[in-house]
Image: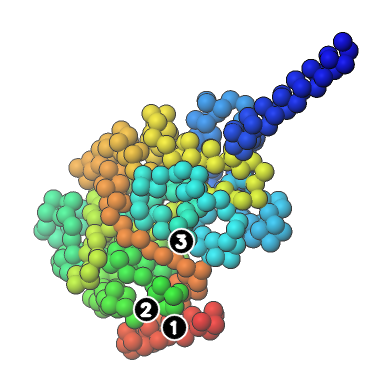
């Protein structure tokens, strides 16, 4: 009797172990109860992730999401962690779009393929997906846009005897913009555009709008393309006609757009806060689509400047939970998630690139601060859908610096021709990279 009982108990225990193993195999990776996120800027990225965490915790109340504001040296600390096989790294980190390709190249196994985790990338702005894609793998969750436009002072347009309504919402060419600038300059003495001469951003905005690339498919420089030549020629024309109010340094550029020294500037949606910081700007600015460079196949009235995206490290011990956080809040169109996107747009000026989010009330609302209550978020969101993809490559930063130096010398007459400017940029790039 005791022997039969022992056999029965043993069989029951064996069956329980087998069933437990089957259940474990069928349930996928075990979810943990904590996710650590690294990002920066408490009023923008950190704030947005805190709002995402609050949404996630409503459905997952026992999960702790620790958001660390890495104000300085985030990339250096990430590199140290990657070189130490993931030691000390968080589960999730935010990367600038222009930097991520270097990390994906230098550390090819360091990040989770989120396409394989079921993220639907057709729901995001296409241009954001390019930098995070390697072959058939996609590694990030796109966050914010740097959708750009031409910001114009309507009071100076009116002072030139022109009607701002004739330009509002119009897909202008650069030829039309130059004509406008010449009329404004003649009547008011104001150059058309505030331009930070030691900064690459404005030229990059123009080049990206053409659909051109700074690099060829094999990774070599592509500065002799028709798109780049025409972009550089445009800047030289703006400079030679006195349509650029040139300053050096970011703070001086911000002062220029807020001190009545120019009639406008070319930059992204995130400039809203700077424009609104000066009450005297109320009612004066309108924003039109990024102007078109004529004669370049694939050019668009749209471009981008800035933006970041979220990534999960392969070394994470909380990988399944981290993926679930990003996928279920940032990449799923539930009413709660759409309201999350609507909230961060209103409270932080963070415009997401998750396309379903653009139905939110804050995306479509008029903004009384701008000329005739322009629905600024609606317009920037609509332009975002047409932004051409730009591949940055691991050597984007040395290319950027080399082109910025050559462009400044070209404007100052230290370099005589476009060909000489391109050659100077190529030489500096080769000296830095060896390529």
Which residue is the site of mark 2?
223
Which residue is the site of mark 1?
426
Most foreground residue, 185 or 298: 298
The answer for how far apart the CA atoms under marks 3 and 1 are is: 28 Å
Secondary structure, mark 1, is: helix
Residue 127, by quadrant, is bottom left
- Asked if 88 appears above or below 324 in the picture, the reply is below
Which residue is the site of mark 3?
135
In the image, residue 66 lies at what x, y percent? 62, 38
Do labels 1 and 2 touch, CB within 8 Å?
yes
In the image, residue 326 lies at what x, y percent? 51, 41
Q: Can residue 327 be seen by looking at this rendering? A: yes
Q: Residues within 10 Å of mark 3 (few under 14, many from 20)?
A: few
Residue 229, by quadrant, is bottom left
Q: Earlier in the sequence, mark 3 or mark 1?
A: 3
Mark 2 or mark 3, whichever is nearer to me: 3
Most foreground residue, 321 or 148: 321
Q: Residues within 10 Å of mark 1 (few under 14, many from 20)?
A: many
- Asked if 395 appears above or below 369 in the picture, the reply is below
- Residue found at x 70% / y 29%: 18
Q: Earlier in the sequence, mark 1 or mark 2?
A: 2
Mark 3 or mark 1, whichever is nearer to me: 3
Q: Is residue 17 left or right of residue 174?
A: right
- Residue found at x 72% / y 24%: 16
Most foreground residue, 202 or 278: 202
- Residue found at x 11% / y 57%: 162
Q: Earlier in the sequence, mark 2 or mark 3?
A: 3
Q: Is residue 318 left or right of residue 411?
A: right
Secondary structure, mark 2, is: loop
């Amino acid at each position: 009797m005791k022997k039969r009982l022992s056999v029965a108990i043993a069989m029951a225990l064996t069956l329980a172990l087998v069933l437990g193993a089957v259940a474990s195999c069928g349930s996928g990776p075990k979810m943990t109860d904590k996710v650590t996120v690294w990002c920066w800027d408490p009023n923008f990225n950190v704030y947005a992730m805190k709002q995402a965490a609050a949404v996630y915790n409503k459905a997952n109340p026992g999960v702790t999401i620790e958001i660390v504001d890495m104000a300085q040296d985030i990339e250096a600390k990430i590199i140290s962690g990657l070189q130490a096989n993931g030691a000390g790294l968080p589960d999730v980190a935010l990367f600038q779009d222009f930097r991520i390709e270097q990390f994906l190249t230098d550390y090819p196994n360091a990040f989770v393929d989120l396409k394989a985790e079921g993220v639907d990338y057709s729901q995001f702005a296409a241009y954001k997906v390019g930098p995070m894609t390697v072959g058939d793998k996609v590694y990030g969750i796109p966050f914010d846009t740097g959708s750009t436009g031409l910001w114009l002072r309507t009071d100076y347009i009116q002072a030139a005897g022109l009607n701002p309504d004739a330009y509002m919402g119009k897909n202008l060419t650069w030829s039309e913009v130059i004509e406008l600038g010449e009329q404004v300059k003649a009547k008011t003495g104001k150059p058309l555009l505030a331009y930070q001469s030691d900064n690459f951003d404005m030229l990059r905005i123009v080049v990206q709008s053409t659909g051109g690339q700074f690099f060829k498919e094999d990774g070599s420089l592509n500065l002799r393309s028709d798109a780049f030549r025409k972009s550089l020629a445009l800047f030289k024309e703006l400079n030679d006609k006195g349509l650029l109010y040139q300053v050096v340094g970011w703070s001086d550029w911000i002062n220029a757009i807020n001190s009545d020294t120019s009639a406008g500037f070319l930059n992204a949606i995130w400039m809203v806060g700077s424009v609104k910081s000066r009450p005297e700007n109320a009612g004066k600015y309108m924003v039109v689509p990024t102007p078109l460079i004529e004669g370049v196949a694939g050019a668009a009235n749209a471009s981008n400047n800035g933006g970041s995206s979220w990534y999960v490290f392969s070394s994470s011990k909380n990988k399944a939970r981290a993926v679930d956080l990003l996928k279920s809040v940032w990449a799923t169109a539930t009413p709660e998630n759409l309201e999350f996107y609507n909230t961060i747009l209103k409270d932080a000026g963070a415009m997401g690139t998750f396309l379903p989010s653009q139905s939110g009330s804050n995306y479509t609302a008029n903004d009384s601060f701008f000329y005739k209550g322009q629905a600024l978020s609606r317009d920037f969101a609509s332009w975002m859908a047409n932004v051409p993809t730009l591949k940055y490559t691991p050597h984007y930063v040395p290319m950027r610096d080399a082109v910025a130096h050559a462009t400044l010398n070209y404007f100052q007459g230290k370099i005589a021709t476009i060909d000489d400017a391109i050659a100077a940029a190529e030489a500096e790039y080769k000296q830095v990279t060896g390529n």
